[in-house]
Image: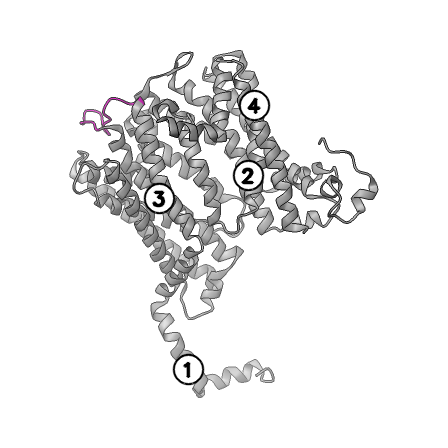
Amino acid sequence: MTAPATTTDDRTAPSGGRGVASLYAGNSRAVMARGWRATRSSNWMIVVSGFFEPIFYLLSMGIGLGALVGEVATADGDVSYAAYIAPALLAVAAMNGAIYDSTWNVFFKMNFAKLYEGMLATSLGPLDVALGEISLALLRGAFYASGFLVVMQALGLNLSWWALLALPAVLLIAFGFASLGMAITSYMKTFQQMDWINFVLLPMFLLSATFFPITVYPQAVQWIIQAMPLWHGVELVRGLTTGAVHWGLLWHVLYYAVMIVVGVVFTTKRLRALFLD
Amino acid sequence: MSAESPRQQATDAPETTRPETARALAAGARPRRFGAWYIAEHRFRVMRSYLQTMLATGIGSPIIYLYGLGAGLASLIDAPVASQPGAEGVPYLVFVAPALLASAAITVATEEFSYPIMLGYKWNPTFTGMHASPIRPGQIVDGIVISVTVRILATSAVYYLFMLLFGAVPSPLGYLAVLAATLGGLAFGHLLMAYVSTLEQDTGQIALVMRFLVLPMTLFSGTFFPLSQLPWFLQPIGWVSPLWHATELSRVFAYGYPEPLWLTVVHVVVLVAMAAVGWIASRRIAARRLGR
């Protein structure tokens, strides 16, 4: 995206040891377009079905648990339990959409379809592959987020016009998770090892102020949770949909900006180490 | 060998029992008899390759769930929770712990009876290889069932230990909840195995099962809140959900949740029936699929 445009010479040159040019052919769209076509022809049902996941959670927790919980106190007054968890589920949906695409799909493409070996045998570099796959994951995240925001609006859970900004916020979250997820997937060798991903996602999902405020925990536990990415996503989106907007939200944005940079660099390095060195 | 025509081979074979034939037949006798245990051993060896993952998730998830929900959600839900309107309530942690146990058993079952089955038939067809030996298709299924049962039992037992540690099991009969959860895992797992065994092409069916069966089952089976909190038209989900039956059964054992005896019996019967149907179907499908 921001890398310098390459000349024809660079594209045909053998890769390795020539800076960004050897990693990036400026054609990540080809990778993305390929993934999009493959999705359309094979597993679009799965992609569409992912949209229902947060809705199931919202209905189950919002109706069932909401009846047991009642209202939740936040910094800006009490909100209904459904309005409390909905933004968290939105952030989780962004995380999940990005993680599925950048972990399970990438794992399969890497180890079974041997797709990247083919791609990297062309003029495409590892950064093209990384950015292409991440963009695809982002597209999916955007789709889930827009749908869920519409559902939230219909159920009256968007309490402020700031909720419109939740969409870019969600894309930021998805970008962060997709870029890092793909790098981590490159270390996985078996299906069962993929469970590690769930192992990290589960506590984040459960404890990141998604279903209850983190203030119920001792300070040390709170610090751990606050170091995790999802908490920042939840706080950011919740601030926007409930209208509790303040400058402090920018810290969360910064967190994701750093995560994105680290993730993209890391993924590119890994792909290069796996396939080119 | 290669010089002989197939016809000659066919006419020769029945008349003379050559020594190598006798040896081959003798060598096949044991696998023919103990085939299921051979397969179980194979599965255990495969499991060793992801032992670390099993340990981490097996110990990590109970801690996270029990701590997360016990300390977190429980703080929002002060009032005692009763499974049925009119019944006596218990603290939220005691209410939710048996459901988490049953849900963990079903998670393990889902993991072992889904992609690994697809793998064995299609992607990395080890089942075909096993079938090329004297082991019968039904024994392959049995061996997988044996190995997964052991894993679910172990996972549930660990979960139960953490439930004890968190003080979530008031009843002295609580350990029986481990068996209830395992039964629930097998009930769902066997049916899942039968379904996955029929899949010739992977177009994401397993992912759809996870999303439209496993997840809603977890969310709407009276796990995190009593089934009676749901609108009446959603409550039948519980009746067909192995998770609901396993959870209710676990609750009876874990804290003496009062329900009529016939209903407790129904839970057991439904779960056993589901497990049996799934098992038999899986064996039949295996015989058909590997035999052709």
**Residue identifier under label 4:** A253
Q: CA distance from mark 3 to mark 1?
A: 48 Å
Q: Is residue A115 visible?
A: no
Colour theme: one colour
- Which stretch is magenta? B76-90
Chain-order first, disc 3 or disc 1: 1
Whether marks 1 and 2 lie on the same chain: no
Looking at the rendered image, the disc whose residue lies closer to the viewer, 4 or 1, is 4
Looking at the rendered image, the disc whose residue lies closer to the viewer, 1 or 2, is 2
**Residue identifier under label 3:** B59
Disc sitting over residue B83 in the figure: none
* Tag 1: amino acid: Arg
Q: Nearer the viewer, residue A237 or A250?
A: A250
B5, above or below B67, in the image: below
* Tag 2: amino acid: Gly
Q: CA distance from mark 4 to mark 3?
A: 34 Å
* Tag 4: amino acid: Val
Q: At numbered mark 3, what does the secondary structure look like: helix, strand or loop?
A: helix
Decide: marks 3, 1 in contact (CB < 8 A)? no
Decide: marks 2, 4 in contact (CB < 8 A)? no
| B39 horizontally vs B88: left or right | right
Residue B19 in percent (x, y) is at 43, 87
**Residue identifier under label 2:** A181
